[in-house]
Amino acid sequence: MVKAVVDAGRSAPVLGPGRTIASRREGAPTSLGQVESACWAVPRTVGAHYWGLTLAEQFDLIAIGHAIMDIVRTCDDAFLRHAGLPKGGMTIAESPEQIAALAAQLTAGFEVSGGSAANVAVGMASFGGRAGFVGRVAEDTYGRMFRHDIRGTGVVFDAPSVALSAKGTSHALVLVTPDGTRTMLTHLGCSAGVDTHLIDAETIANCRMVYLEGYLFDCPNAKAMLGRVDAMARAKQRKIAFCLPATSCIDRHRAAMLSVVRDRVDVLFANEKEILSLYRVHTLDEALK
């Protein structure tokens, strides 16, 4: 069913399109060199309704995914080995405390709003497109930071915050080694269950394309949510774009992802490593067959 495969080669050499920073927090350190150069500077005076839109109006893109605050730090390979984190992968954290303990050992860094789908929505808006984002944040510090940042780019984000709970807003420790590889340790928090009721038929009907991030497969209700989105999109002849996640996430959900890519996706975004991992092949020619 896939009509196009887009090579999401890592043009942003540090974090890549799946983790490209949506905005940089004011006062963030500038000593991270290559990491800092990947950040997008965005006007913070632009409000949520910069386009004069609501979620009942026409969008070029509706992006659905995890609303994540990134805690960016630099480290060496020895630190990754000590932490037991596979280099270049995305590991689900055992608890928020695990992230806090590791981050406390590394001083140079900054915090920014991120997430694969959210970053794509920001990218669309930066090129003059009309974009909305669907995701969950808690009523906590990270949730308020995320909402402020993404609205500041012109992306419409109107989902209500969930009540403050032990889960809190999703956040990820993004560890960047000197060679530019980023390794993630993610606490999904309240984002672990993207509410299907946040995605309604009217929203889907009034967008040109729905973008889904592969990291949604780590949600317990992923199958139900993806099925609902697919049914609504097909009913209105809207296209679905899907971006493969890190290979560690592909390994966790390969069979389900293969089914979605085969039956429900019109445009697939992936880099070479991800597409080869999905199909367990050695060359792009084999993967594209």
Image (cartoon, helix red, strand yellow):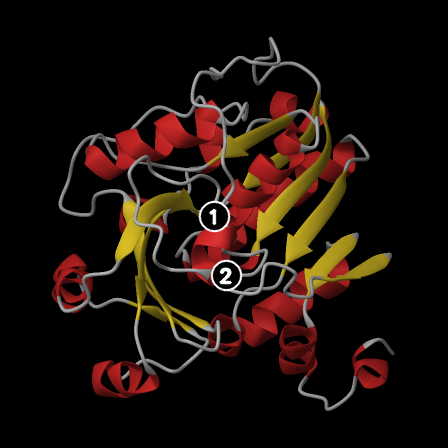
Q: Which residue is mark 1?
A: 21
Q: Callout 2: few (<14), some (14-19), or many (20+) C-alpha neighbours within 10 Å?
A: many
* Real-space Cα separation, disc 2 to disc 1, in angstroms: 8 Å
C-beta proximity under 8 Å, tags 2 and 1: yes
Residue 57 lies, with reference to residue 161, above or below; the image says above
Q: Callout 1: few (<14), some (14-19), or many (20+) C-alpha neighbours within 10 Å?
A: many
Is there any visible trace of residue 188 in the rendered image? Answer: no
Task: Give the quadrant of the C terminus.
Answer: bottom right
Is there any visible trace of residue 58 in the rendered image? Answer: yes
Q: Which residue is mark 2?
A: 15
N-term mark: 2 or 1: 2
Task: Give the quadrant of the N terminus.
Answer: bottom right
Q: Where in the figure is residue 200, as x and y percent of width and height?
A: 56, 27
Residue nearer the viewer, 165 or 46: 46
Residue furthest out toward the bottom: 282
Q: Where in the figure is residue 5, as x and y percent of width and height?
A: 80, 62
Residue 248 lies, with reference to residue 238, above or below; the image says below
